[in-house]
Amino acid sequence: MSKDLLVVIDMQNDFVTDALGTAEAQAMLPALSELAHSWQGPVVFTRDTHTSDYLHTQEGRNLPVPHCIQGTRGWQIVDELQDLAANAPIFDKPTFGSTRLAHYLATEKPDSITFCGVCTGICVISNVLLVKAALPETPIRVAASCCACVTPQSHQTALDAMKLCQIEMI
């Protein structure tokens, strides 16, 4: 039996409806929820995780919008995915990409990995490329219609960059 793994990137309230929410993220959420709930293999999540000193970090100085502060509503996985997240590994990450996620996936040795989530041009691309480096022979896919970025243009730019790195768009 093959093990096809789904990685859901940062589907948190602050990226969908709250501090950094976008119409694009809200619009793609039903498709992502359908994909995740119908997925036949393991599902894992990442969760952007900051502390109250976020504005004093390098990221906070470049993006001075407090978001995903650990323990807040904005940090929580969106309601539509809470049931799946309750029983799935969640990788809290203080930055765009998670080396812990890449290590976990290298240890799990899935037959393929599909990514979805937000933000395509920041956290999705960062994690996809980290995993591609850790597992160069594992097929990696991105469910393009189940990702969103700050703008449709930045979403497309990220998809194009991942295609150049031999990531399959589905």
Image (tube, rainbow, N blue to C red):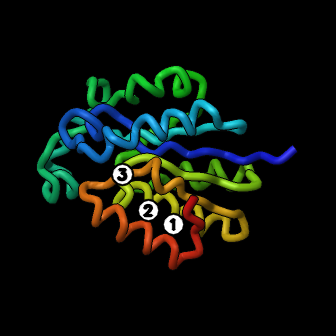
Q: Identify which residue is drawn at 49% across, 33% down.
A: 33
Q: x, y percentage for residue 74?
A: 27, 30
- Closer to the camera in the image, 28 or 82: 28
Q: Which mark is residue 125?
A: 2
Task: Name the secondary structure under disc 2.
Answer: helix
Q: Residue at x 76, y 54 (%)?
A: 111
Between 80 and 135, the one nearer to me in the picture: 80
Please provide percent x and percent y for residue 4.
72, 47
Q: Amino acid at mark 2?
A: Ile
Asked if 87 appears above or below 8 in the picture, the reply is: above
Q: Are marks 1 and 2 in contact (CB under 8 Å)?
A: yes
Residue found at x 12% / y 50%: 64
How far apart are the alpha carbons under marks 2 and 3? Answer: 11 Å
- Any mark on residue 129, and which? 1
Numbered disc 1: secondary structure:
helix
Residue under pointer 3: 148
> Marks 3 and 1: CB-CB under 8 Å?
no
Amino acid carrying mark 3 in the image: Ala
